[in-house]
Amino acid sequence: MILFWKNHASSTRLSRTLFAFALSALVTLQALAAPQSIGTADPSRYLDDIKSLTAPSMEGRGDDTKGLARAAHLLEKRYHELGLKPAGTNSYFQPFTVITGAKLQADNRFSVQEGDQKQGLKLNQDFVPFSFSSSGSVSAPLVFAGFGASADEFGYDDYAGVDVKDKIVVILRYEPAGFAEKSGNTGLTRHSQLISKAINARNHGAKAVVLVNGKLGEGEDDLLTRFGSVSGPANTGIVLVQVKNDVADRWFHAAGKSMADVQGQINHATKPQSFAFPETLHMSINVDIETTRATVNNVLAYLPGKTDEYVIIGAHYDHLGRGNYDSLAPSQIGQIHPGADDNASGTAGVLELARVFAPLKGQLQRGVLFASFAGEELGLLGSAHWVQEPTLPLDKAVAMLNMDMIGRIKDDKVYIGGIGTGSTLKPMLEKAEAKSNFKVEYSAGGYSASDHTSFVTKHIPVLFFFSGLHSDYHKPSDTWEKINPQAAARLVDVVGNTGLELAEAADRPTFVAVVEDKPLAGGSGGGYGPYFGSIPDFGQVENGVKFSDVKPASPAEKAGLKAGDILVQFGDKPIKNLYDFTDALRRSKVGDVVDVTVLRDGKPVKASVKLEQRK
């Protein structure tokens, strides 16, 4: 119509009228073409997707199962049917490798030499290695180190007065009975944790740890821990096995002692009773463990917009498989943990939003990336991999909306985190949820135990949608029948309308670094020990702890530490993994000035960090 006016330019009133009419019509059509709303989530369709994702054939969507691959293909098929573009390198899939655990190999041996007599122990009958033990051979004398605890806060140290360097230490499970009274609570302290015992022994120079159950409760059997059922790093840097009580009793008898009596003395006085076993007693251990790995896939689909900027709507689709150390129902490990709420609920939400956004292809100002992440249950590995190797330009991502456990909304109460991470997020969110009638608890910060954290570390604004923890979390009882699909669909609509606001806004939100973070109700605690302020990169590194970010105004930032640094030394303690770092922090006090060493671009950098009170 503009061409018509140019070719017939005249000053007649008719021509001017026709042009005005045409121009008005064009503006009206353009306004109609700009989407003002999207469709709504369908509760029935939403629940059907959760049923599909939790079917027995999905095997709990564990990262080491064929069921996870089946779930990935279900997502791929749906995205393809909706006409969405692949957003991986050449497909909807972005593959990456994860460590899924460990398995025992053929050469696991344990023998004890007493004088000229040698006794061989039987695997899984007399002894068993722990899955995070180092592989290798150790042959050395024995030292009894009580409960393996160094508890400065209680004035107690099992390693005081004994030399364990290059020795094998024998330690009891749990902790001295007096620790509960001294700590002022009835529960066990951190000193009871096996990983803390192993790190403490290694830091004292021991070459191996042999754990025994010691005194048993009434009706309790002297059982070996099932291999792979205890949480730990891939490798603690020390050989670590468990033996039966009757095996260890013979070693105590060789020293003229009784294991039960020694444990009783420790418990009675809360005083160490450590000693070296006779030199005639010598032990040889060989541990042969293979770290298991799997290739898994993020599933990524893209709805193009008019520009190259885009909004990310995501959720993790993996879960626990048949459980393991991460199951909160230890007696049911081996049963399928279907993960209806965690996180088939969020995954179904992404599928519903993909469906309602799909007709808007090319109409939105910004595109939408629909991201289904694997590896979240292993430590946010899928999202961490994507931000390290993004399949779309990272600087074009305007915000990330993450749904994790949104299916069990009770009394219309929901939790939304990250509203402080973007300059315009709060008003957009308030507009999107104005008619939802939810009772919303907000959190400004964007750091918590789900995939949006990976995006905050890259200074991308985030929103985290969550309906709270419940008694079925990480258990086989997290089933589809307990989902509240009507309320969840309403929350999915809030996510969708917020995404629409972000896709159509004239300006993208500016990232804001939130100094203090209020944890979401029902979520995890505030960390361990004094405040340090680093955010770990959960991507697996060979040695040390890599920082994906450093919190503003934190002790770490004040000391000059940066994102990308790899912590390898904390005071006098080597840091090989996140467990070492956690243990070192727990052993520190508020106000301590700790000399640390990080690797920055492969070169060591030293800094002094003054630890603060955790708020």
Image (tube, rainbow, N blue to C red):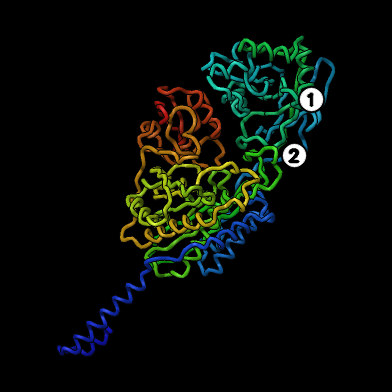
* Helix, strand or loop for disc 1: strand
Residue 601 is at least partly visible in this image = no
* Type of amino acid at the residue the image marks with label 1: Ser
Q: Could you tell me which residue is drawn at 51 percent across and 62 percent down?
A: 352
Question: Residue 482, image x and y in percent?
Answer: 59, 50
* Type of amino acid at the residue the image marks with label 2: Gln
Q: Quadrant of the N terminus?
A: bottom left
Question: Residue 318, image x and y in percent?
Answer: 59, 51
* Helix, strand or loop for disc 2: loop
Task: Name the foreground residue: 21 vs 290.
Answer: 21
Task: Name the foreground residue: 498 vs 252.
Answer: 498
Which disc, if any, is residue 105?
2
Question: Residue 228, image x and y in percent?
Answer: 68, 37
In the picture shown, does residue 490 fall above or below 525?
below
In the picture shown, does residue 412 fall above or below 534?
below
Report which residue position mark 1 lands on: 111
In the picture shown, does residue 460 fall above or below 40?
above
Which disc, if any, is residue 139?
none
Residue 282 is at least partly visible in this image = yes
